[in-house]
Amino acid sequence: MRRCVIIGGAPIGNYSRIKSKLRPDDFLIFCDSGLRHLEPLGVQPDLIVGDFDSAQNPHMAVETIELPTVKDDTDTVFAIKTALARGFTDFLLVGVIGARLDHTLGNVYILLMLNHRGCTGAIDDDYSTMSLVSREPVSIPDTCSFFSLLNIEGSAHGVTIQHAKYLLDNAEIPPEYQYGVSNEVLPGETAVVSLREGTLLLIQVDRPPEGQRV
């Protein structure tokens, strides 16, 4: 099954990084003002969705779903639901992390929606990759500058971190005490994160913004 890539309207500053994450056979859904990224990414949409309140309908020769402006779902969530209904199980979201904290948090929680449905998902921005750790251990290479583990659902129990600067062994990360921020993989090693119960948001930072190393 092809991977589904959702392109939102949040700013993208490092197009070369995002382009490196794309695959030739990806199914690409552009959401509303995400169409601004069409030319810089050098791709063609397979589907366009949106209420077009922040961008004009381009009326391209591409399947387009025009949504009402008054609705429960954001354009991005609608795109996810449409892709799920079409059988996609692997997702990448780009252009969904920006200055609107409400939209950013809502989009991060899409990863949880996908996880609850047994699907896989990731979010990439100019600096980092976000994904979830839940049922299976996750490996983190030493090419990652920093990584953080944040609890976004309930309490995470049996958290174990190996081959990193800060280790954990069968620990708990509760939502009110997020002490898993800014860890580092040991040089020449591959860190491994696992947990017995719960869900953690894993943020792997390739290169932090200038002046924001910690």
Image (cartoon, helix red, strand yellow):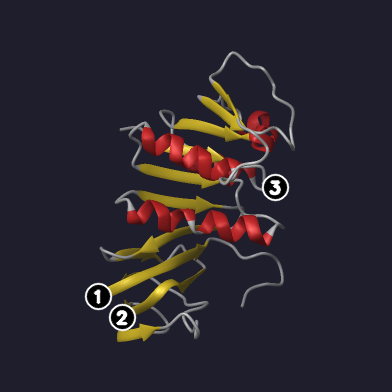
Q: Nearer the viewer, residue 6 or 52?
A: 52
Is 177 located above or below residue 81 in the figure? below
Amino acid type, residue under disc 2 in the picture: His
Residue 62 is drawn in which quadrant?
top right
Is 65 located above or below residue 187 in the figure? above
Residue 140 is drawn in which quadrant?
bottom left
Residue 53 is drawn in which quadrant?
top right
Instruction: Give the Cα distance between marks 3 and 2.
Output: 36 Å
Q: Which mark is residue 196?
A: 1
Instruction: Give the Cα distance between marks 2 and 1.
Output: 6 Å
At x 47%, y 73%, the residue is 150
Q: Are marks 2 and 1 in contact (CB under 8 Å)?
A: yes
- Measured from the top left, where is residue 4 in percent x and y? 43, 37
Instruction: Give the Cα distance between marks 3 and 1.
Output: 36 Å
Q: Which mark is residue 11?
A: 3
Q: Nearer the viewer, residue 50 or 164?
A: 50
Residue holding disc 2: 157
At numbered mark 1, what does the secondary structure look like: helix, strand or loop? loop
- Measured from the top left, where is residue 100 in percent x and y? 70, 57
Kindly report which numbered mark, 3 or 2, lies closer to the viewer in this rendering: 2
Q: Are marks 3 and 1 in contact (CB under 8 Å)?
A: no
Kindly report which numbered mark, 3 or 1, lies closer to the viewer in this rendering: 1
At x 67%, y 47%, the residue is 10
- Measured from the top left, where is residue 1 in percent x and y? 30, 33
